[in-house]
Every structure is written in structure tokens, then in C-alpha cells.
Amino acid sequence: MQRTRRTTPTPRLSMAAVALGWALASGAALSQTQAAAPHNQPQPLTLKALFEHAWARQPAAQSAALRREAAQAARNSASSWTAEPVALELSTKTDRPGSNQGNREVEIGVTMPLWLPGERARKAALGDAEAKAVDSRRLAAQLQLAATVREAWWAVQRAQAEQGLAQDRLLNAQRLAADVALRFRAGDMSRADQFQADGAVAQAEAVLAEATGARDVAEAGLSAWGGHLALADGAEPEAEALPANGLPADHPAVADWQDQAEVARRAADLAAVQTRANPELTVAATRGREQSGDRYLQSFTVGVRVPLGGGDRSRAKELAARADALDAEVRAGVERNRLAADVAAAMSRVKATQAQREAMARHAALARDTRGLIDKAFRLGEADWPTRLRVELDAVQAERQLARARIDAAAAVSTLRQALGLLPQ
């Protein structure tokens, strides 16, 4: 008779299985956490988001809807049947107040102000011009705000780039100082070399402190427009798209003055026909009696009230409106000439900064290669310490110039878009 042997897992194998399962579960949880982490992190601030946030906090943005409604209501008033609201008239007449005796008369009527010839159509045209002027004034205010936001944005980008390069310079100086300290203890370098390396570290620390302060000041100024939005620290600036067209005919700064001129012209046209007050049509019903006990008799009255001319007052109103139209037209022409000059200067600036960026990129690449060669030669004892320090400073300066050139090129494109009347995107 054979016996079946039953094997039971040893405690060591059980613990290994538990440990393996715990490790797998921990790894899965860690991977899920790492996958979910980017979603919880705040998105870096962009120029477009900053502008939209700043515009939402402006009084012109918050009152824009009400101004459009007001302009639309003024336009709708030209569609009514009467020039002014209808008035209701109610009167009573008696020769014995406080008594039901004697003569009594009650009159009820409606007074309707009538349109002057051509007034209704010109008031509608004025309403359309005012509604269009509201939108153009909003776009001009957005463009004016965009100029301020862009200036603050690129100031922060420059300050952050300077601070990041200052940090790299300090790290390199500390690494070189540590290398020099080891060589000094080994007797390969002098104490003067050690002092020179420590001085380079101190100088890099001073530059970093200055750059950090400038960055904090710039970010504080930008936070005034962006509120509590997170700022990207040390990230590569995202350049706006380079526009291909020239100065547009509907530039917001020019369209604002043109629409104001159109409003003034329409107001002058309206004033030209409003030479007198509006005539009034009156329709009334009268019910009365002669003596107590007589039957009440009813009569109807239809009347027209025509005011005389307004004289010099209406003429002064028309001339003032035409003067405002002429002033706005001249301002629109001056603004267009100024913008054309700004666009030409901005395009030249874009070409110059792009060429400078390419040259600085080549210079920085050569400086990095030179630093690598001199560093290798210094470690092999084929290059002296002053040469190594000079090459290091040249490489840091080249990187700084390249960072500035990149930001200047991006800022030049942004300035060109501002001159063309394009909002941040």
C-alpha cells in the first residue's frame, strides 16, 4: 500500500510570494500615481492665458455686454411708431367745485409725438453706427491692454533666463572650485589658484542673487495681471506665430477712430433734420353737460401741434457733431501713418533678431565645444588654470547671449503682432 505524500509550502517560500505580490502591487500603484500626477499639476502660464485673465478683470470687459445692450436699445427706438413715448392726458372741468351741480366736463386724450421728415431713418443709422463703435472700442481697449501684458511677459522671460543661467554659472564655479581644492591638497596647484577659484564662486553667487531679485520683481509685476496663475520657471519661451500680412485695413486702433467719426457724422445728419421739436398728434374724447339734470354729450377732438424752428441751437448741434467727425477722421489718418511706421520698424527688428539668434547659436555651440576640449586638457595637465577659467567664463557668456537672443527674437515677433493689431495667441 502506497502512501501519498502531501507537500506544504515552506515559510520561506510563502514570505517570498507575499513580498513579490506586495512589490507588484506597489509598482502598479506607483505607476498609477505617476500617471495621474501630471494631471494634478498646474499647467504653465501662457501669454494667451495671461491676456485673457487680465482682460476678464478689466472694467471695459465687464461692462461690454451692457454697452452692447444699450446700443441695441437705442437702435430699436428708431423702429417705434412715435418719436417719443405716447402721453396720456386726463382733465375735468366744472363751474361748481365740490358739488355735483352745474356744468361738468371730462376729457381724456392721447398725445403722440411724430417723426420729422427723414428723422427716423437717420436715427436708425446713428444706432447702427453706435453699435459698431462699441465693438471697435472694445477691440481697441483689448489691444492697448495686450501691449502692457506683452511687455510684462517678456520682462519675466528675460529675468527667468538670466536667473537660470546664473544658477548654471554657480554650479560650474562650485565644481571647478572643488576640483581645484583637490589638486591643491595633492600639491598640483597653488594657493593662489584656490583663491581665484573661490573668488569665481563668490562672484557667481553675487550674480545669482542679483538675477533672483530681478526675477522676483518681474514676476511680481506680472502677477498683478495674472492673479494667482502659476508661472513657468525657467521654461523656454513660446513664441507667437509670425504674421505674413501687412497692416490690415481694419486695424483696431484705426477702426476705433473711424467708427467714432462715423458716429459723429450720423449724429450730424440727425441734427440736420431736427431743426425743431417733434410735432404732436392729439386724439381726445370729451363727455360733458351744461346743467344738472341734462344729458351728457360726447365729442371727439383731433389736433396737431407743430413747434416752430429751433434756430441757432439746432445749427450749433449739427456743426459740433461735424467737427467731432472731422477730428476723428484726422486722428484715424495719423494713427494709420504711425502704425505703418511701427510695422516697418518691427519687421526690421524681427529680421535682425532672427539673424542674431542664429549667430549666437553658432557661437554658443563653438564655446561649448571649446570648453569640453579645454576641460579635458586641463584634467590631463595640458592646459593651465587661467585658460580653463577664461574658457569657462566665455562659455557662460555665450549661453547668456544665446538665451537673450532667443527671447529677443520671440519678443520681436510679439511686437510685430502688436503693431499689426493682433491679440496674443
Image: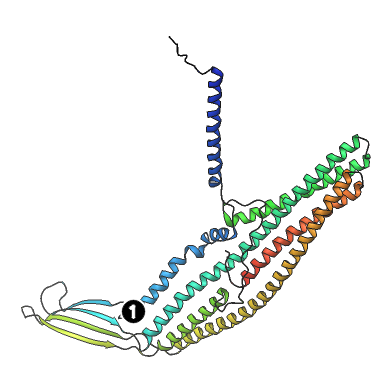
Q: Residue at x 70, y 74 (%)?
A: 345
Figure check: 185 above or below 119: above
- Nearest to the observer: residue 235 or residue 49: 235
- Residue 335: x and y, percent? 61, 78
Figure check: 146 above or below 372: below
Residue bearing the label numbered 1:
79
Q: Residue at x 89, y 41 (%)?
A: 194
SS class, disc 1:
helix
Q: As shown in the figure, which amino acid type bears the numbered disc 1?
A: Ser
Figure check: 108 above or below 7: below
The colouring scheme, among rainbow, by chain, secondary structure or one colour, is rainbow
- Nearest to the observer: residue 279 or residue 331: 331
Q: Residues within 10 Å of mark 1 (few under 14, many from 20)?
A: few
Q: Residue at x 87, y 38 (%)?
A: 181
- Residue 47: x and y, percent? 60, 60
- Nearest to the observer: residue 53 or residue 295: 53
**Left or right placement of residue 331 versus residue 389 in this view:** left
**Which quadrant is the C terminus positioned in?**
bottom right
**Left or right placement of residue 289 versus residue 89 in this view:** left
**Left or right placement of residue 212 versus residue 38 in this view:** right
- Residue 287: x and y, percent? 14, 80
Q: Look at the image and tell me whether residue 130 can be seen.
A: yes
Q: How many labels sit on residues? A: 1
**Which quadrant is the N terminus positioned in?**
top left
Figure check: 102 above or below 221: below
- Residue 204: x and y, percent? 80, 47
